[in-house]
Image: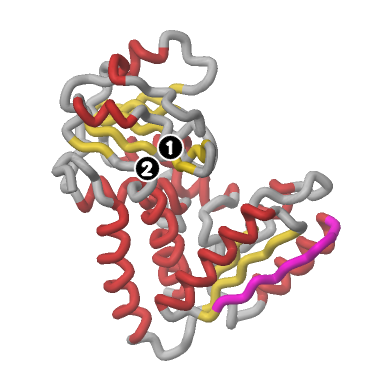
Amino acid sequence: MNEKIIDGKKISLERKELLKEKIAKLSSKLTLVVISVGDNPASKVYVGQKEKMAQEVGYNFKNLHFDVITTSDLIKEIEELNKDSSITGIIVQLPLPSNIDKDKVLNSVSSLKDVDGLTNNSLLKLVKNEHSLIPCTPKGVMTLLDSYKIDVIGKRIVIVGRSELVGLPLFHLLLHRNATVTLCHSKTKDLKSYTREADILIVAVGKKGLITKDMVKDNAIIIDVGINRVDGKLYGDVDAACIDKASLMTPVPGGVGPMTVISLMENVYEAGK
């Protein structure tokens, strides 16, 4: 393995073993519920991955699936799960069909069971640096930085992508750690002028090869969150050749992806506490 590679797969397996030990000591089993609607093929794969991982670490798992449902009926189902003390964590699998009000549905999940960290309540707590369940991909990125003992204090960090899933939460998490953070997005003019200044560059856009070698500072640390499937192969948002200039870089696949899944399982444990 190239010594410049940040090995998310290895770190996730180590954390999985630690988590299994903690779970084995619990007096009762924790339960994760994933709610899915419609017949999105990718969603079925993701639900299956969550089920496999949940069972491997020692959780109960339930998939509450609806072929067709209204927003109000879905919210009623979620409210019942909120009240059920045997349910530890609730995930609404995205995307939802277009007839459903995504924001209303997500925000009906109790913040105590919001293991995806996507409710307004959870995000507000994150912004205010109060204890909350952190969205899984940003949590995974922070865990990787910590695992590789990457100190962010005073570092110039550039995040490309401002989604509520990744970019925005990461901006606040890194700010709370006293990094100097710039958030770039699709309307940013002269993106290269920002990325070339980054000590740590984090890219989460979903556009294959968006960042090229000439856009990266020498010895930068690169965290590539992008996953792009082209002709059956997975690619990141950062051109693989950028590793020549980087001091450390996450691969795709095998970098941030495995950390997202283990972070979800860690959030279920947190919610159980």
Residue at point 40% right, 76% down? Answer: 57
Q: How is the image coloured?
A: secondary structure
Q: Secondary structure at mark 1?
A: strand
Quadrant of the image occupied by residue 17? bottom left
What stretch of residues is rendered in magenta? 61-70
Residue at point 18% right, 48% down? Answer: 1
Return the residue nearer the eye: 258 or 265.
258
Compared with 72, 256 (above or below) is: above
N-term mark: 1 or 2 = 1
Residue 215: x percent and y percent?
31, 17
Return the residue nearer the eye: 206 or 111.
206
Which image quadrant: the C terminus? bottom left
Circle 1 Cα neighbour tier, 10 Å, few/some/many (<14 / 14–19 / ≥20): many
Query: Do the residues under discs 1 and 2 have CB atoms within 8 angstroms?
Result: yes
The secondary structure that dominates the magenta segment is: strand
Residue at point 24% right, 45% down? Answer: 6
Residue 203: x percent and y percent?
40, 32
Residue annotated with mark 2: 252
